[in-house]
C-alpha cells in the first residue's frame, strides 16, 4: 500500500482525498487492477 502515503502527501484536503478514493474504487471495480 505504498500509494497510500503518496495520496496523503498529494491530497491535503479531506474532500480531495475522498474524491480520489471514490475514483480509485471505481477504477478497481472496472478491472484496472488486472492491468497493473
Image (cartoon, grey):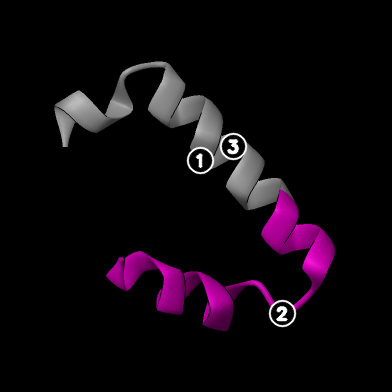
Does 15 appear above or below 10?
Answer: above
Q: CA distance from mark 1 to mark 2?
A: 17 Å
Q: Which residue is mark 3?
A: 23
Estimate the x, y position of residue 4 in percent, counting from the top left: 43, 69
Tag 3 secondary structure = helix
Q: Quadrant of the C terminus?
A: top left
**Left or right: 17 in relation to 1:** right
Magenta stretch: includes residue 8: yes
Q: Earlier in the sequence, mark 1 or mark 2?
A: 2
Residue at mark 3 to residue at mark 1: CA–CA distance: 4 Å
**Contact, CB < 8 Å: mark 3 with mark 1?**
yes
Q: Which residue is mark 2?
A: 12
Number of residues whose C-alpha sits closer than 10 Å to that of mark 3, classed few (under 14), some (14–19) or many (20 or more): few
- Toward the viewer: 13 or 25? 25
Assign a secondary structure to mark 2.
loop
Residue 21 forms part of the magenta stretch: no
Tell me the residue at 79%/74% (across/down).
13
Amino acid at each position: 500500500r505504498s500509494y497510500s502515503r503518496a495520496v496523503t502527501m498529494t491530497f491535503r484536503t479531506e474532500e480531495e482525498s475522498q474524491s480520489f478514493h471514490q475514483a480509485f474504487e471505481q477504477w478497481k471495480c472496472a478491472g484496472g487492477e488486472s492491468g497493473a
